[in-house]
C-alpha cells in the first residue's frame, strides 16, 4: 500500500506537462473572433460526442489541501480504496437537486471521513461573471481579451477528466474542486465514513508524494494543477507573497460560510416556527446550542437563535 505508484522521473515529466498547459499563453486569432462559418460548424460536428443521461456518468470530487508548515508544507488528502485496489481522490455522483460543488464536498466527507469546505484559488477560467457585480461578489478579477478568459479568485472547477468506465459502460466525466479541512486539522473520523467506504485508508501526503500516488494519471494531473494554483494564490508554504489574492481567498470563504449557515438554517423551518412561537422551546434550544458551539460562544448562540426567529422573513431563503 505504501509503494509510490510512479517513479520520480515520470512524476517530474507529468508536473512539467501540466504546468506548461497552465502557463501557456492563449491568443485567439482575429479570424476566430468573427462569427462561426460553415467550416467551423463542420469541425465542431466532427469532434462532437453526444450522450443521453443514461450513458453519461458525472462525478464530483476534491483535491483537498491542508497547511502543515511544521511538517514540510501543504499536504493533499488521498485514500487507498481496497475494493478498487487503487489510490484515489475522493469523488462520487451527486444527489438529485444537489449542486456539483456541494456534491464534491459531501463525497469527500463520505469517502474519507474528513469534513471539508471550499478553498478559493486564483485561476484562469472561462466562467462568465454576472452583471452587475461588486468586488465583494467576484474577488480579484482580471479579464484577458486575447484569450477570452478571466483570472479570478474563485471556487470553480480546478480540473476535469473523462473516460469510458469499464464497469458501468458509461462515459464518465469527473470534475474536481479545491477544498480544505473545515476544522483546520483534517484528521479522519472513521464514524463519518459511509458503509461502503469503511475499508478506505485515508492519508495525507506532501505535494511531491501526492503527485505520485493516484492510480489514474488524470487524477495525478488534478493534484498538480491544484498545487500550482494553490502556490500562486497562497504561496508554496501557505503564506502568499501576493497578499491580495490570499486576502480575497479568505474573504470569499467567509462569505460562503455565512451563506452556508443561512442555507442550513433554511432546512429547519419547522424548528424556526417553534422557536418563534414558544419561549420554553427557545430556552431549551439555546441551552442545547451552548453545549455544541465551540468555547460556549454566546454571541454565536444569539446569532443562531436570532436567525431562526427571523428565518421566514429572511431574503433569498427558499
Image: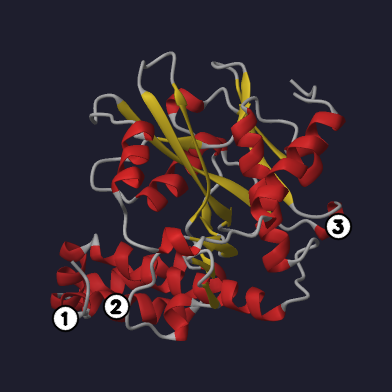
Image location (x, y in percent) of residue 105: 46, 49
Where residue 63 sits: x, y (%)?
59, 46
Give whichever of discs 3 and 2 has the lower sequence position. Answer: 3
Residue carrying label 1: 313
Tell me the number on the disc at residue 70: 3
Q: Is residue 196 above or below residue 210?
A: above
Which residue shows up at 66% across the image and 36% down it? Answer: 220
Callout 3: few (<14), some (14-19), or many (20+) C-alpha neighbours within 10 Å?
Answer: few
Q: Distance of mark 1 from mark 2, alpha carbons? A: 10 Å
Q: In the rendered image, is residue 186 in sight? A: no
Asked which secondary structure carries label 1, the reply is: helix
122 with respect to 106 (left or right)? right
- Residue nearer the viewer, 138 or 82: 138
At a point 35% along the width and 73% down the height, the residue shown is 286
Looking at the rendered image, the quarter that the C terminus falls into is bottom left
* Quadrant housing residue 195: top left
Amino acid at each position: 500500500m505504501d509503494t509510490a505508484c510512479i517513479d520520480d522521473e515520470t512524476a517530474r515529466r507529468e508536473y512539467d506537462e501540466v504546468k506548461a498547459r497552465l502557463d501557456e499563453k492563449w491568443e485567439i486569432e482575429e479570424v476566430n473572433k468573427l462569427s462561426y462559418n460553415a467550416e467551423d460548424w463542420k469541425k465542431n460536428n466532427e469532434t462532437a460526442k453526444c450522450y443521453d443521461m443514461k450513458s453519461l456518468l458525472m462525478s464530483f470530487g476534491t483535491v483537498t489541501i491542508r497547511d502543515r508548515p511544521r511538517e514540510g508544507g501543504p499536504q493533499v488528502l488521498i485514500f487507498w480504496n481496497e475494493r478498487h485496489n487503487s489510490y484515489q481522490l475522493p469523488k462520487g455522483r451527486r444527489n438529485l437537486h444537489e449542486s456539483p460543488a456541494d456534491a464534491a464536498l459531501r463525497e469527500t466527507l463520505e469517502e474519507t471521513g474528513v469534513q471539508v469546505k471550499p478553498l478559493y484559488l486564483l485561476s484562469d477560467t472561462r466562467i462568465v461573471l454576472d452583471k452587475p457585480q461588486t468586488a465583494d461578489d467576484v474577488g480579484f478579477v482580471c479579464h484577458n481579451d486575447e484569450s477570452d478568459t478571466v483570472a479570478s479568485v474563485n471556487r470553480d472547477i480546478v480540473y476535469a477528466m473523462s473516460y469510458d468506465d469499464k464497469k458501468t459502460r458509461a462515459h464518465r466525466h469527473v470534475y474536481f474542486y479545491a477544498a480544505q479541512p473545515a476544522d483546520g486539522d483534517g484528521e479522519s473520523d472513521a464514524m463519518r465514513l459511509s458503509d461502503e467506504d469503511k475499508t478506505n485508508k485515508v492519508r495525507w501526503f506532501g505535494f511531491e508524494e501526492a503527485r505520485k500516488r493516484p492510480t489514474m494519471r488524470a487524477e495525478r494531473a488534478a493534484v498538480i494543477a491544484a498545487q500550482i494554483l494553490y502556490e500562486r494564490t497562497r504561496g508554496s508554504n501557505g503564506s502568499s507573497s501576493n497578499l491580495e489574492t490570499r486576502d480575497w481567498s479568505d474573504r470569499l470563504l467567509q462569505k460562503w460560510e455565512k451563506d452556508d449557515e443561512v442555507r442550513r438554517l433554511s432546512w429547519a423551518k419547522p424548528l424556526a416556527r417553534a422557536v418563534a412561537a414558544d419561549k420554553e422551546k427557545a430556552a431549551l434550544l439555546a441551552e442545547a446550542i451552548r453545549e455544541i458551539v465551540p468555547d460556549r460562544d454566546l454571541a454565536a448562540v444569539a446569532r443562531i437563535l436570532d436567525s431562526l426567529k427571523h428565518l421566514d422573513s429572511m431574503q433569498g431563503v427558499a
